[in-house]
Amino acid sequence: MRIRLGIRGKIAAVILICMIPVLILGGLLFQSRNQGRLEIVQRGHRDLARAMAADVQMFLAGAVEAERTAGAAVTSQPYPVSGIIQLFAAIRAKNPSFLSLMLIDAAGTEVAASPPQPFTLNLADNPAVGPVRNGKEWAAGPPVWVGGHPTLEVATAIRDKQKLAAVVLGRLDLGGLRAVMPRGLGRAADGIIVDTTGRLIIDVRQPARAPEALQGLGAVRTALAGLEATLEGYSDGGTGYLGAAAPIAGLGWAAIVVEPESSALVSARRAAAQEMITVLTAVAVGLFLAWVLGAELSAPILALVRGARALGRGNLGTRVALRRSDELGELGNAFNEMSERLSRYVTEMNALQAVSDAALSTVRLGELLPPLVQQVGAALHADAGLIWFVEEGTGDLVVPAGFNGALAAKGRRLRRGQGVAGRVANDTRPLVVSDPARLGTLDPALRREGAFSTMAVPLRVGGRVIGVVQVLSQRPREFTPHEVRLLETFADRVALAVDNARAYEREREIAGIIQQTLLPPRRVELPGLAVAGRYLPSREVGGDFYAVLPLDHGQVGLAIADVSGKGIPAATLSARARYLLEAFAQDGRRPEVVLSRLNQALAADTESKFVSLFYGILNPRDGALLFASAGHLPPLLVRAPEDPPRLLEAPGLLLGVEPGTTYAMSETRIRPGDLLVLFTDGITEARNAAGEQFGEQRISALLATLRDAPLDEVADRIMDAVASWSGNGPADDQTVVAARMTSLM
């Protein structure tokens, strides 16, 4: 009889008996326990290092106390020098660590010393005496090797009523530290004391160790900085060591314990070997049992793995076939449900992205709506889609002009509450009609056109209903609540796109009105001068303008300008510049003066926008043309057939950039029949499909063939040539002005 285990029982069995889990668990346990054993060893080393540091501090504290007692004795009552020397000699006899003792008065002068010093010491530079005289209770100098033995000078303050009375300076034989330490060092461990530079002072086990042997170790540097540290990675003569370092407070030294790894870890490695044998035994048992149950457990799991990988490769909707009644079978069913939902979710996200892309593709309402509604209908697998807008004034629902509506929507008008869309707009909530009979009652026109069911949601902007988006099915279908929520999500994107498009259309209309008010007639006839102008706005209305200004004494002002930016801001600045130009030019001021005053007015409040402008004054009486330019393209002057077109160049900074800018004036003569052509960068920078600009050379070459052509033909031919070059509509405003002297007055 075959025993069938539940999934919980099988997983529990695998955890207990399968080789890999046991091996992983054993390895982790082995590593953890080894780490614990290592930490125990390291903790012992740190304890020993702290004990050594404490021993050194106690040794030093005893010396300081002995100095303080001796100093207090000789300063509390008058003492002859010989008596002081005898007292110091007695202290040295009792404490052999003192190699010498010296009494120094508060002024820093030697009073007495034992043994007597053969020469006078420079106490002012003594590193131990100086800090004590400056207020410290005691201080130690750096270790000094005398006769191969480390010594240390220690100075102690002797105070009388908080005032420094004297200083006792003693030299200690640090070899005496061997008598008070180490305590608890094993046979293989070594105790070491290093000074502030990391140089060895005392080495208990290996006195011959190089003084600089430990200077480069990070643990030693850490201990010298005042923190305990564990020493690892140190080797000497091929032997690896473990250990610890502890700071010695008051001296800036460090106490170090080192022990060969082979000695320190012997017990830990013995215990680890025993545990490894146990783990390997368990693994062997697990191998056998895993072989028995592995086949049954692995087959469904591998099937799920293959399914998951298929999903990862993008094969959405992948299913796995597990004919099982246990928990693995339930897992397979859950996987299939997840795969189906994931496929549906990704499809919806792609649809939402497509709707968003369509919403962002253009800001022109007529171009926006058809692809947008088409994407919404396709995302919901609907047969048709509609969009209705609330008409301002009446509040009726209408299909936008130019939108090819579906079914019977074209040309329809619905009152609020009428039809499905009217009810949605009136109630401001979604409506689903899946019953053809009910649809025939609510919206007979749609039912007559073959619609079986429909779903509609309001378009909202800022809490205000601006329309309705609706999808239709021409076959029996019930739209689900999930599809309603999805359509509402689409409607949010549609409403935002529609609102942006309407704002763009309003802005473009206003900018266009402003722009048209700036332009003179296409043809201007003045005594001695004829002018023809052409202006073609881009998809985004900009700020090009030109002007023909009759001035006093029969003179004529000619100007052409290009304002940075697009839309209403550019058109407004263009209008302001145009009216200021006319105001400043009316009294016949010279061109450079007009530009300077215009720049001063614009620079005050153009908010980082600028204007390029060419302005010239033509006197038809003698043909004199005075002109100045503010960063504008130079016009072309076409003379007799034998002369090539010439650029009328004049230097000058753009208007509105820098207050106080001055401009230079240039002068030339224009004869009857000469042709003067002004243009903006929308002409020269028009690009073809390869990205190549039209350029001034092509304009010059074209004008060479139009020397004697009528002015209107000159302007039209230039605009046609640019349009043929660029193919699509202009990316920037295009303006051309052609002027010709007809005669001298």
Image (cartoon, rainbow, N blue to C red):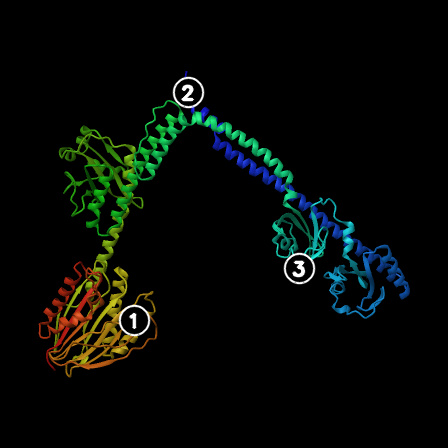
Considering only order in the chain, which callout, 1 or 2, is on the residue closer to the N terminus? Answer: 2
Look at the image and tell me whether residue 193 can be seen.
yes
Q: Amino acid at mark 1?
A: Leu
Q: Amino acid at mark 2?
A: Arg
| Relative to 163, 728 lies left or right | left
Q: Secondary structure at mark 1?
A: loop
* Mark 2–mark 3 distance (CA, rounded to whole Å): 73 Å
Residue sitting nearer the eye, 469 or 424? 469
Residue sitting nearer the eye, 198 or 574? 198
Estimate how packed mark 3 is, as few (under 14), some (14 to 19) or many (20 or more) residues with alpha carbons within 10 Å.
some
Considering only order in the chain, which callout, 1 or 3, is on the residue closer to the N terminus? Answer: 3
Q: Which residue is mark 1?
A: 655
Estimate how packed mark 1 is, as few (under 14), some (14 to 19) or many (20 or more) residues with alpha carbons within 10 Å.
many
Q: Position of residue 26 (x, y in %)?
A: 53, 34
Q: Secondary structure at mark 2?
A: loop
State the residue lying farthest toward the front: 237
Q: Which residue is mark 2?
A: 4
Q: Quadrant of residue 530?
A: bottom left
Residue sitting nearer the eye, 1 or 387? 1
**Disc nearest the viewer among 2 and 1:** 2
Q: Give the position of the N terminus as an image quadrant.
A: top left
Q: Which residue is mark 3?
A: 197
Q: Is residue 515 above or below residue 381?
A: below
Query: How many marks can you see?
Result: 3
Look at the image and tell me whether residue 531 can be seen.
no
Q: Quadrant of residue 688?
A: bottom left
Considering only order in the chain, which callout, 3 or 2, is on the residue closer to the N terminus? Answer: 2
Q: Give the position of the C terminus as an image quadrant.
A: bottom left
Q: Is residue 27 above or below residue 178?
A: above
* Mark 2–mark 1 distance (CA, rounded to whole Å): 90 Å
